[in-house]
Image: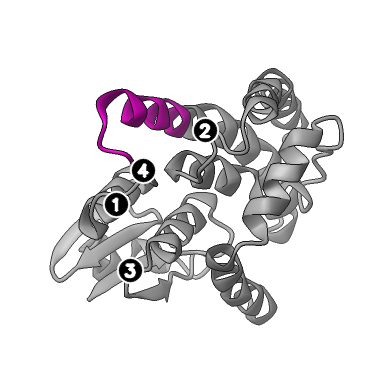
Amino acid sequence: MLNIYGHFLSMPSNKVRLCASYLGLPHEYNHVDLQSGEHQKPEYLAINPCGRVPAIDDDGFMLNQSDAICKYMCALSGPSPFYPEELHEQAVVNQWIDFGTQHVLSAMGRIFFNRVVAPMIKQDVDEASIETGLQMLARDLPVIEAALVAHKYLVGDGLSLADVTVIAALEPCEMAKIDLSPYPAIVKWRKTVMDRDFYQRVHAHFAAEMTAG
C-alpha cells in the first residue's frame, strides 16, 4: 500500500495528494503533526531523513521531495497525457514543474508563512520577506497568465502535472491575501481545476483537517 505523509498547510504535501487523487492511486494519507515535532521523531526520520513533508512509503520504498514523488506516482500509474512520455511534451511539463516549485512556490512560501503560519505559531512576521515574495509573484504571475490566455491549461488543452504543481503553489492565495483579479485567465483556470472531482476529493478531507486542527 502506498502511504503518503504530509501536513494540510504544506503546499508540497497537497501537490502530492492532488496528484495521487487525479491518478486514482489507492493510498493511505498520514497527517504529520509538525507543531508537536512528529517530523523530527525517529519513526518519521526513518521514512524521511530530511525531517520534512511530504514523503511516501510504498511497501518499503521510501521517497521524499514532492516533484520526485509525483513523477514516481505517474510512472506507477502508467503512461498518460497527465505526464506525457513524448520527449518534447514531457520536457515542457517538466519546465512548468520546475517553474512552479522554484519560483511560484518559493514566492508563496514567503508570503504564506509570514501572513498565516507565523501568527499561528507566535513567531515574528518578516515584512521584508513578504515584500520579496510579492515582487517575485509580480514577475511570475504574468508568465502563467500568458500561457493560460493561449490555452485552457498550462500545456495545451489537457490537464497535466504542470497544472497540479502550479495550482498547489497558488492554493493558499485567499488565506495569504493574494489578489489574483488582475489575472483573469488564472482566476478562470483555478476555478476550472478546483471544481474537478479529483481536487474536491482531496479538499473535502483538507477542510476536515483544517477544522480538526
Secondary structure at badge 4 equals helix
Magenta stretch, main secondary structure, is helix
Secondary structure at badge 3 equals loop
Q: Is residue 66 visible?
A: yes
| Inter-mark Cα distance, 3 to 4 | 16 Å
Where is residue 184 shown, x and y percent of the image?
81, 35
Secondary structure at badge 1 equals helix
Amino acid type indicated by mark 1:
Cys
Question: Where is 201 relative to 98, above or below?
Answer: below
Q: Residues within 10 Å of mark 2 (few under 14, many from 20)?
A: few
Where is residue 48 shown, x and y percent of the image?
27, 56
| Inter-mark Cα distance, 1 to 4 | 11 Å
Read off the residue under disc 1: 74
Read off the residue under disc 2: 156
Read off the residue under disc 3: 25
Amino acid type indicated by mark 4:
Asp
User: Is residue 183 rendered magenta in the image?
Assistant: no
Q: Are marks 2 and 4 in contact (CB under 8 Å)?
A: no
Q: Which mark is residue 2?
A: none
